[in-house]
Amino acid sequence: MTFAPPQGAGNAIQRRTSAAPPHVSPSGRWLIPRGKVNFAPSGERGSLRTSEIMSTRESTSRTIPRDTEMPSLLNSEQRTRSIVRAGLMGIAVNFVYALLKGGIGLMSGSIAIFLDALNNMSDAVTAVIAAAGARLARRPADRFHPFGHGRVEYLSSLAISVIIVVIGVMSLTSAVRKIIHPEAAHYTLLMLLIMATGVVAKLSLGIYTLRAGRRESSDSLRGAGTENLFDAFVTIATILSALILIEWGIDLDGWFGAAISLLLIRAGAKITRRTLSNILGRRAESSLTRYIKSIIASFPGVQGVYDLVLNNYGPSYMVGSVNIAVAEGMTAGAIHMLTRDIEQTIESRCGIYLNVGIYAEPSDPETLRLRSDISRIVTAHAGAMEIHGFLLDRKRGQVSFDVVTDFTVRHRCEFCHTLERELAAHYPAYSFLIHADFDYSD
């Protein structure tokens, strides 16, 4: 099975592997080093003996500091149990309070309380979807889905956000109707006490669910937790509306209901945007990509780290590719051992399968000087960030390299042709072949 990096890998030589490694990191954490990270380490430029490559893992474990921790790709089974547990708690709490508040809303005639009950019922439904999504996402990979079913969680999160928006729109319609045609609401002390206990329950549930969502990197749980906290504040507003009516006879029930509905719609739209961003393919977190690059750059023999691409196949699974620069005199066997050790280290520390390609790093002064001059010319153009993968073919009189462009460069082919023409005017003895890479990661 071949895992080739997506467009942007340049002239990298791609390795083949028989099977993808497991999804899960044994450590379960990403450890982020502090301080400045050098992704193109300097040092001796020359061939490495096989014996030097063999000690790479040990030297890397000493080189990379383990100072700071951040959530990582956790154990899938443990993660699923945690999400399902939080979901079941949400189902129980929200269903009970939906029935209580629904009864209070009907007896009191308060539209705000009744809408709050509907919101509790929708939260119970979202908890069911979150738990079911986590279970479905655990289905193993198959022939038609070789990267697993982890993205089901994103679909469940999208379903949750749509439910939130729909409930918000329905609530807003009812609240506006109450403002236009007001009806007197009646409250008792028992009703208000039951609602007050709901505030405590929803605050506790919201904090628990939100923390679980952050710990397990679950958008569904984060959305459910946010909604539970939101509901607690909604109930507080409803109680205030009731007290104002009792004390001063001013009916703000419809207005509070409208405000609650608008905030609910806003929250649902925010979850929708975040979920769609994950489905479309969001840029990987800077802390993660810098950590991965720092690990790779610490290996003896690695003279540069480029083109890191990470593809997210769910909160628990990432597949990616990266290119490294090595000495042009390095043997194929030494390169094989180096790239294999890098892949295994990234898998064990981050739980990410990373396919490693190579660039041959020139060593003769004339080529290095030519590369430096060309780099200065290219990066003088707006949008050009750096060049790498520099290859001088003296036999054919051709210079080729990759140029990393930022996202202000809309027409990359035309941009490369412009650079080729400009460089050909400076160096008529050579022809130029330039490939444009996106700025995929920090």
Image (tube, rainbow, N blue to C red):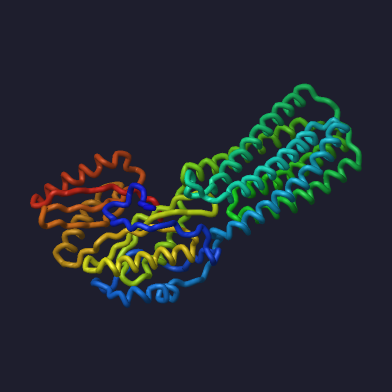
Q: Is residue 277 above or below residue 295?
A: above
- State the residue at coordinates (66%, 30%): 169
Measuring from the top left, give residue 362's x and y in whole percent. 20, 64
Task: In the displayed orientation, state which residue is furthest to the top.
Answer: 181
- State the residue at coordinates (77%, 47%): 92
Task: In the displayed orientation, state which residue is furthest to the left.
Answer: 429
Residue 390 image-quadrant placement? bottom left
Q: Is residue 336 left or right of residue 441?
A: left
Q: Is residue 257 above or below residue 207?
A: above
Q: How many marks?
A: 0
Measuring from the top left, give residue 138's x and y in whole percent. 59, 51
Residue 288 is at least partly visible in this image = no
Which residue is at the front of the view, 240 or 342?
A: 342
Which residue is at the front of the view, 46 or 178?
A: 46
Residue 119 image-quadrant placement? top right
- State the residue at coordinates (36%, 75%): 54
Residue 98 image-quadrant placement? top right
Q: Is residue 408 above or below residue 52?
A: above
Q: Is residue 228 left or right of residue 106?
A: left
Q: Quadrant of the C terminus?
A: bottom left
Q: Is residue 314 left or right of residue 388?
A: right
- State the residue at coordinates (54%, 65%): 26
Measuring from the top left, give residue 172's x and y in whole percent. 70, 30
Residue 9 is at least partly visible in this image = yes
Measuring from the top left, give residue 387's x and y in whole percent. 27, 55
